[in-house]
Amino acid sequence: MTMLVEALVQAVTSQVVSAIAQEAQFAFKFKDELEQMKTWLGTMECLVVDADKKLMKQRRDQETVKKYLSKLREVIYEADNALTDYLIREEEQKKKRFFTCLLPLDPVFPHEMGKRLTKINSEIKDVHDNLVRYLSATAAARDNASDYMSQQINSSRRQFIGSQDFCLHKTYGLDGDIKKLTGWILDGNKKEPVAMNYIGIVGMGGLGKTTLAQKLYQEISHHFEKTMWVCVSRNSSERFILKNLLEKVNENTSSLDSGQMLRRLINVLEGKSYLIVLDDVWPYEKNPDWLKDLCSMLPTSAGKSSWIIITTRNEGVAKSMVLRNTQIHYPKTLNNGDSWDLFSESAFRKNNGKCPDDEFKLDSEHILKKCGGLPLAIKTLGSLLSQKVDSPTEWKETSEKFHALTKGEQTVAVIDSLRLSYDELPHTSLKQCLLCVSIYPEDFEIDAEQLIHWWIGEGIVRENHLTTAIELGYKYLAELVNRSLLEVVDRRWYDGKVYKCKIHDMVREVIIKIAGDEAFCIFNDQGKLMQKDKQNMPRWLGISEDMDDDKKELEDNPKLRTFFLMSNPPSNIGKYFRSLESLRVLDLSYSKVVKDSSTTSPVTCLEDLFRTNVEDLFSYISSLKRLACLNLSGTQIKEVPSSIQKLLNLQILVLNKCIKLDKIHPSIKCLKRLIVLDVGDCPIGCLPKGLGNLCLLQELTGFKVTQGCALRELSELKELRVLRIVLSADTEISQDEMGILSSLSNLKVLTIDAEECKEQETSGKLDGLEMPPNLRELYVKNYHSNRMPNWFHPNVLSGLQYLSVENCRIKKLTSDQSTWKHVEGLCLKLLNYQEDGENLRKIMPALRYMEIRHCSKFKNLPREVVEQGVWRKQN
């Protein structure tokens, strides 16, 4: 809890600092209170960190500190609400500024806000004083016990993580992996020996990476003159690793410092072939490149191959070893057959691994599905159930309570292994990002963009002076994937950008426990989301078919900050919105309400959902004054009315694929905090004039260039990073608009879709456009011209890294053989002209990803493209 409270403190401190820095009437009136809050928050941040370091691992201490931190968390959330209300108030005052000389001053708001801030500061001080007294009173006892418990925990962890039993029992599902890795090593040695080679075995905790490495070690160790295996673990120092490497070759390391040990290791390996396995490598914060540096200093011998193999949960660790001669293997989870065999060995050991009755097998399938092919979980839970094998009834009852099983002492190894990956996340914001995933039902495919929008709306991810919040969100998501905590369902392979992801059921068991402890969500004994329990109300809630609560009405919950609707909605849901005064994220995009019984496709109709008209619908929504993210994509709303202007804290508005949306009220330009506006795939004719008022906008999707919505509307949007424009039948681009895009110096992604513009003459009007100077990605769709625009040339698009051309009438991609030096990714679809694949790679020498589909006249394509449509350059 301490780490996540620390994150809340940091986030609110950032808001306070921002408020003080603003030249606003509010900040001036309450400067003393804000300065005091800033001081107290800074003090509390240090104290929370101190409490985390000194907290004794005994229940009485945990519960006492937890009580104080829970109180602090509530105060911090109230501070967040107060500061958000201030921002909203400031925006309201700006709207009325023109009439300030005519309107009387409102004395109520300043008075009430002053009282709120004073009370918040007083409550923070109380928590601080109580926590200081408690920690001081128990300091001596806690320090002694902490040292003892730390030793015990590290000892047990080393024993578990570093266990190296080379007398392996029968293994399951590893034959293919062993064959592949053995081929890499032995075949490589026979053909053209390379002096130094590297293999990374990457996967989540409990996947069997160590077992695989041990089996491989048995198979190939006799091919090398020296072999060494070191269990690295997460707290191992460079000295520890060097010491253990030398001891594996019977070298005395007493009285040697790190430099001397390294020199001795080099001498021992000089002129020899060797195999080194570093098991369970974690990122090393003090020196992130320590592994690469160590490997680079080890000796090589002509005509002899040496290999370094590491196992790790972190893909980044494996990739950082070296740039050349590195191969990475990702072991897969066990298939159904191997899962059953491993489970049977553990669960039915009294019967020599044979299932005594088909009834046991049927009841065990539920367990195996939850284990998701994770060997450690299968073996552990199989062993647990083996104690019930004499009672079919007890077996059945136990197997159906998977969530309860994971709380038992017998599963400590599994949960600790997975919890370790969570604990090792480098900062608290990343931990909160992962906990958000707990709201989704089991096996749910999570849309990455939706998840990142949630993180931003919740305030977990915030922009800094170098990176936007959206860019940072994708970095966080990639980090969670690299650490094997999320699984990729769909991604863009040229740069690894994740589009969809999911979470392993066993990892979900870990994070729903943490999310429950932190009072973000509430789960029952089966691990299903609940609306409330007797004592708590959640801050995140997702209404889904997986929920335990059968009630059809949404509970009043003034603490709720995030609400997702992922199934049929509760009855008359709209009337409850006014009670959700803390709500930051509202997402109705997953809701499914079948409006027409004659069709089988689920359709969301918000007017039916709220049993009201669209004005009343937005009346409900606009009462959520603190709302930061609103997603109504895929719904059947017909218009966005003027009441949208009340959402002055709104930062993200997603209306994608609202197939009946034909009107957005001009008052949308009042939403000055908006950073994302998505009206893609909507029939709306044009966006309202005055978009330039949205000066913070970073992503704009679905901008139709028409006579009523000209390109000049974009001229003031200097913060735009992503722009997706649509050419319509009446597109007009005047001469003075040709340079508009070139003025958007921050624009990195541009999509031009001419689907609604069938005339070549209109398409040709793009020739005079001047392109953004820092464009990185370009998407051209449905372009009805025989050639690409004049600006499509490497001299103009000098920084382009990714190019996608789809369903165009062009007769040639490039007009000459000019070289595109930086293009790394290429996607071509539905093109009906002749092209040479070898020529493409010649004019794009940096190309490492190529996707070509439905281009029947292309020739000399790599075999992978012909067979699967995708080619990736091998490292």
Image (tube, rainbow, N blue to C red):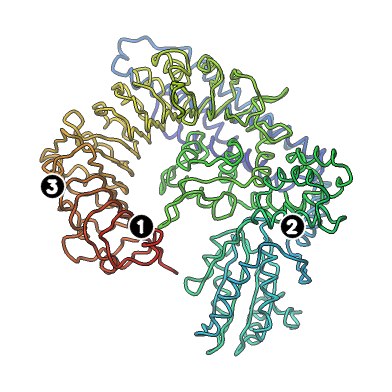
**Residue linked to disc 2:** 342
Among the two numbered marks 2 and 1 on one chain, the one whose residue lies closer to the N terminus: 2
Give the amino acid type for the residue marked by disc 1 in the picture.
Glu
Asked if residue 460 lies left or right of residue 334, the reply is left
Q: Given this view, does label 2 or label 1 mark the residue nearer the observer?
A: 2
Q: How many residues crowd around disc 1 within 10 Å: few (fewer than 14), some, or many (20 or more)?
A: some
Give the amino acid type for the residue marked by disc 3 in the picture.
Gly
**Residue linked to disc 1:** 851
Q: In the figure, 374 relative to 104: above or below?
A: below
The answer for how far apart the CA atoms under marks 1 and 3 are is 29 Å
Please indicate, yes or no, whether residue 526 appears anywhere in the rendered image. Answer: yes
Q: In the figure, 373 relative to 614: above or below?
A: below
Badge 3 element: helix
**Residue at left 78%, top 62%?**
159
Q: Which labelled disc corresponds to residue 219?
A: none
Badge 1 element: strand
Q: Which labelled disc corresponds to residue 768?
A: 3
Q: Are marks 1 and 3 in contact (CB under 8 Å)?
A: no
Among the two numbered marks 1 and 3 on one chain, the one whose residue lies closer to the N terminus: 3
**Residue at left 65%, top 47%?**
507
Q: How many residues crowd around disc 2 within 10 Å: few (fewer than 14), some, or many (20 or more)?
A: many
